[in-house]
Amino acid sequence: MNIQTIALLILVPLLMWRVYARLKRMMARQQSVMSRHWTGLAVFTAMVLVPGSELVVQQPASIGWLAVGTAAGIAYAVWGLRKTRYEVTPEGYFFTPNARLGMLVAMLFVGRIIYVGLEIFVNQGTANTLPRFTDSPLTLICLGVFAGYFGAYSAGMLRWRYAMKKAAAND
């Protein structure tokens, strides 16, 4: 074992722990801000469309894996929105997502990104070609689940806020 391998063995669990701690704080009660929901919808939609546009041209057979992951993520988000606690207070609109659902999706994606990064690191300096992000069906599924979940969750939050706005206008 060389020093780089030892450093990776120490840093990867530390990185996973820090990501987990950060995500745990983010999965608490939050104020619903429309601009954040719109941004989330745009970013996570782009996370599917950008690799999808590359796959259509270069690997048309692989786009199915991205579509399957995205469909699973959207279905998972519908379930997650049902488990979300919504609050309307004089201070504003608040929601508390189900922490386990969001953490599972996010950690799955982060774990896959770290694995791809380690694979690239291990293959440096060898005759092996470096893998692209869209080469692995598992990576495409993880990306689809992640982007589908958080994109659909953002869309669901927008839907809720517009329903609250409509209800307030009718009162």
Image (cartoon, rainbow, N blue to C red):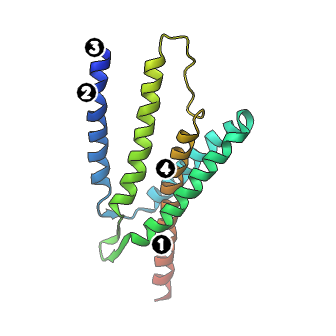
110 to 157, vertically: above or below: above
The amino acid marked with disc number 4 is Phe
Residue wearing tag 2: 10
Which of the marked residues, 4 or 2, is nearer the chain's N terminus? 2
82 left or right of 136? Answer: left
Is the residue under label 1 in contact with that under label 2 (CB below 8 Å)?
no
Q: Residue at x 35, y 64 (%)?
A: 98
Location of residue 74 in the rendering, given as x and y in whole percent from the top left corner: 54, 60
Specify the quadrant that holds the N terminus. top left
Location of residue 7 in the rendering, given as x and y in whole percent from the top left corner: 27, 21
The amino acid marked with disc number 2 is Ile
Dot 1 falls on a residue whose secondary structure is helix
The span from disc 2 to disc 3 (Cα, nearest Å) is 11 Å
Choose mark 2 or mark 1, whichever is in front. Answer: 2
The span from disc 4 to disc 2 (Cα, nearest Å) is 26 Å
The span from disc 1 to disc 4 (Cα, nearest Å) is 21 Å
The span from disc 1 to disc 3 (Cα, nearest Å) is 52 Å
The amino acid marked with disc number 1 is Trp
Residue wearing tag 1: 160
Q: Residues within 10 Å of mark 4 (few under 14, many from 20)?
A: many
Q: Residue at x 46, y 25 (%)?
A: 119
109 left or right of 100? Answer: right
The span from disc 3 to disc 4 (Cα, nearest Å) is 33 Å
Is the residue under label 4 in contact with that under label 3 (CB below 8 Å)?
no
Q: Nearer the viewer, residue 17 or 92?
A: 17
The span from disc 2 to disc 1 (Cα, nearest Å) is 43 Å
Q: Quadrant of residue 114?
A: top left
Location of residue 140 in the rendering, given as x and y in whole percent from the top left corner: 57, 42
Specify the quadrant that holds the C terminus. bottom left
Residue wearing tag 3: 3
